[in-house]
Image (tube, helix red, strand yellow):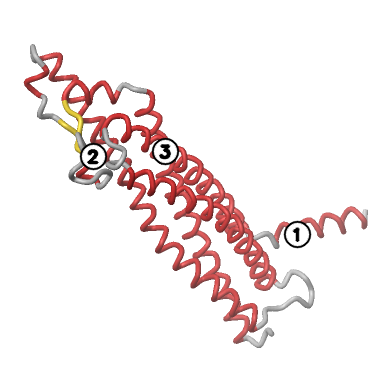
Amino acid sequence: MNWRASCYDCCIRCLGAVPYPSLVATLLCYAGMALFCGCGHEALTQTEVLVETYFARNEQDYEVVASFVEYFQYVIYGLASFFFLYGILLLAEGFYTTSAVKQTFGEFRSTHCGRCLSLTFIIVTYILAFIWLAVFAFTAIPVYFLFNMEQTCHDINILAETTPSINQHGWICMDARQYGLLPWNAVPGKTCGMTLASICKTSEFHLTYDLYIAAFAGAGITLLALILFLVATTYNYAVLRFLGRKGVR
């Protein structure tokens, strides 16, 4: 019975030392980055195909887009590696601060070095959250473009049902140059009328749209994870400071 009670107490102590907010934030961070990196990588590839097939005839016109896609895909590889390692560090820091706050392991106490390390993580995570907010806003641009394109196609289909000749509405277009995807001298740079409506019916368009939505959701989940990390780390640091003033070294 004493052995069982001892195991039970040990399990309770171990479970009490788990930094659940940091653990949840780590899982959210990994899930968000998996969506953002995986779907974003494939969405960029599909975007290049769409631009090359429907919006540009000369290779020089979409050369900038191709270079940007290749460059950003390498950035995605770096982001995935960085956030994987940073998530582990934040989770380890969460274990440290939670153990120090709850004084779970006997003589284990908060140190001045430990509090400085926690403060460093707070500052770095705050900067990352601010940067990632910009990334989150940036990922909304392709979603906005494809949403407008889908709505324009919907309007064209409605006009096609009510108007004898859709050619009368050939002025209904989507111009990729307005969104910076192509230079202003690109030919044709835009698609109009039933040509545009036919693009919206292709599997490439729907796949690209869905991938960008998933990447946008992944960026939002990652931002939420960083905010949760920031809240948990700040709380633990504040408690550590309080313990330090009480003379716990």
Q: Quadrant where the C terminus lies?
A: bottom right
Q: Which residue is mark 2?
A: 176
Q: Residue at x 23, y 39 (%)?
A: 176
- Judge from the rendering whether residue 114 lies leftward or rightward of residue 183; answer left or right: right
- The structure residue drawn at horizontal position 69% and vertical position 69%, both measured from the top left corner, is 99
The location of residue 179, given as percent across then percent down, is: 24, 45
The 10 Å Cα crowd at callout 2, few under 14, some 14 to 19, many 20 or more, is many
Between 248 and 123, the residue placed more toward the observer is: 123
Q: What secondary structure is found at the residue carrying circle 3?
A: helix
Of badges 1 and 2, nearer the viewer stands 2
- x, y percentage for residue 95? 67, 64
When the figure is inspected, residue 12 is found, relative to residue 164, above or below; the finding is: below
Quick check: marks 1 and 2 in contact, CB under 8 Å?
A: no
Residue type pointed to by label 2: Ala
Q: Which structural element holds mark 2?
A: helix
Closer-to-camera residue (68/57):
57
Which kind of residue does numbered mark 3 sit on?
A: Ala
Report the side of 31 relative to 217 (left or right).
right
Disc 1 crowd rating (10 Å Cα; few below 14, some 14-19, many 20+) is few
Residue placed under numbered mark 3 in the picture = 43
Residue 60, picture quadrant: top left
Q: Position of residue 117 (x, y in %)?
A: 60, 76
What kind of element bears circle 1? helix
**Residue identified by numbered label 1:** 14
Q: Name the amino acid type tagged 1.
A: Cys
Residue at 24 percent across and 33 percent down: it is 149
